[in-house]
Amino acid sequence: ATLAIPLSLDGRWTSAAWAVEGVALLWAGLRQNQWLPRLAGLGLQVFGAIAFVEGYGLLGAIDHQNMFLGAAFIALSAWACGWLLHQYQASAGWLKDFATPLAFYAWLWWMGSGLAGINALVLSGDHYIWHLFLGFTALTSLALSQVAKPANWPGLNSVAFLLLPSLFIFVLVEMVGFLFGNRPPSTDVGLIVWLGTFAIYGLMLYQGDPTKKTSLLRAPIIWFVTILLVMEWMHWFRHWVTESGVWQLIGLAIVPMLVISLVLFWQKQTAAKTSLAKRRAWVWWGLVPLVIFLLGWYISMSLGSDGAAPPLAYLPLLNPLDICLVGIMLICLIWQRNMTNSSISQHLSSLMPAVVALLSFMLLNGVLLRSLHHFAGTPYEWSSIFTNDLVQVAFTLLWSITSLALMLFANKRGNRLLWIIGAALMALVVLKLFMLDLSARGTVERIVSFIGAGLLLLVMGYFAPLPPAQTQLEKTA
């Protein structure tokens, strides 16, 4: 009877019949504790898949709306076989180890059937089809997660969380569509589908994780949401403000900062109800890539953007770029203070002040160079520190004043390390005076540089001497 099926039916129905027959044989073999029906039932799953590929022409054009039926029968039969092996572990013997692999195998066929059905039934563009396929994937994961508990099959719940790597693929598709087709994720019912997908995934996390590695399951959602929102920001500001591209680029900072702020606020409100492992998953693993990205964006924009944001006029520290740079420093400090108690957070607490200090110094230099560019007409090039007289004297005075402020603060607090850092910066100023500024002979800028630096050195020596060592202070006390 099995061999007679392909004589009267085509490959699609042959595969479905063999798959269903294989489930029945496996069930009979497990109930009767006989090896031949068990092996025959699993073998028919393989032969059914081969019959589908060969008989239907899977590698050809997908142009028939019933194609998904054959793949769906194979998927449902494989899930049934996996569940039987899990339920009858005592009689299944070593075959019980194939229960979870069969569930993954069935998921692949089910996804293929869904893509085939959507492609056959929907007459629209490729991007629209991908959004529908995303919704199909999310609904499949929801169904599997709901069936896993009553079926008493944890392996099925693990298969449901294949939604996470699928989201990675769909986000890449959205990025390709945005970069090459100028399509934001919200187009073609994308907004509804993505909101529904994240809601489904959140429900799955709330109901329980299939593994103890909660960080790997939770953290990527923050990254995906951030990437999608950044693409939305850049798309709409590309149309709303055409005078300057800086409005698009600041979205790369504003969106991650907003996401970090919301996650930290949410974790603070739910701290009493959330375990330490889950808080660490969100605040540490979820936000660390965003913080690192913000630091990279900070350096890139500080060095590479002149801050012009027409139609707004440029104002130092009151323009969109500088506001974002200040916001990044603040969000880094807030994030570090919200870190849970761990060895990593202790290292961050000692490292973050130095990082913020370097970022602040970079911001001061950037504001000075941008202000000179907009108000004095100097070129916005960091190499102009070596070539432009006005930029040279401006940086000499800025570094000298910064050094004086550090040394005064260090003297007041008795911090020798901070005083040495200020003195090293002043030594750099003196080196710059003799190596660069001295070459501009007879210019007003050269005279101002030397006089200003000399006066500041006198002030430092009188008002900000080197603080005594801690041991000397203790002896004096």
Image (spheres, helix red, strand yellow):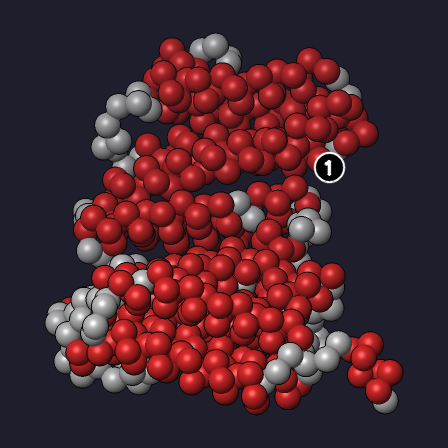
Q: Position of residue 263 (x, y in %)?
A: 54, 72
Instruction: Count residues near mark 1 (Cα–Cα under 10 Å), then give few for <14, some for 14-19, many for 20+.
Output: some
The answer to whether residue 30 is seen in the rendering is no
- Residue sitting at x 68%, y 81%: 467
Tell me: 211 left or right of 113.
right
The answer to which of 342 and 231 lies nearer the viewer is: 342
Q: Position of residue 318 (x, y in %)?
A: 31, 85
Which amino acid type corresponds to the residue marked 1 in the rendered image? Gln
Kindly indicate the quadrant of the structure image that contains residue 306. Answer: bottom left
Tell me: 304 left or right of 44.
left
- Residue sitting at x 61%, y 31%: 101
Does residue 65 sit above or below 127 in this rendering? above
The answer to whether residue 215 is seen in the rendering is yes
The residue to which callout 1 is attached is 87
Q: Position of residue 132 (x, y in %)?
A: 33, 52
Does residue 445 sit above or below 163 in this rendering? below
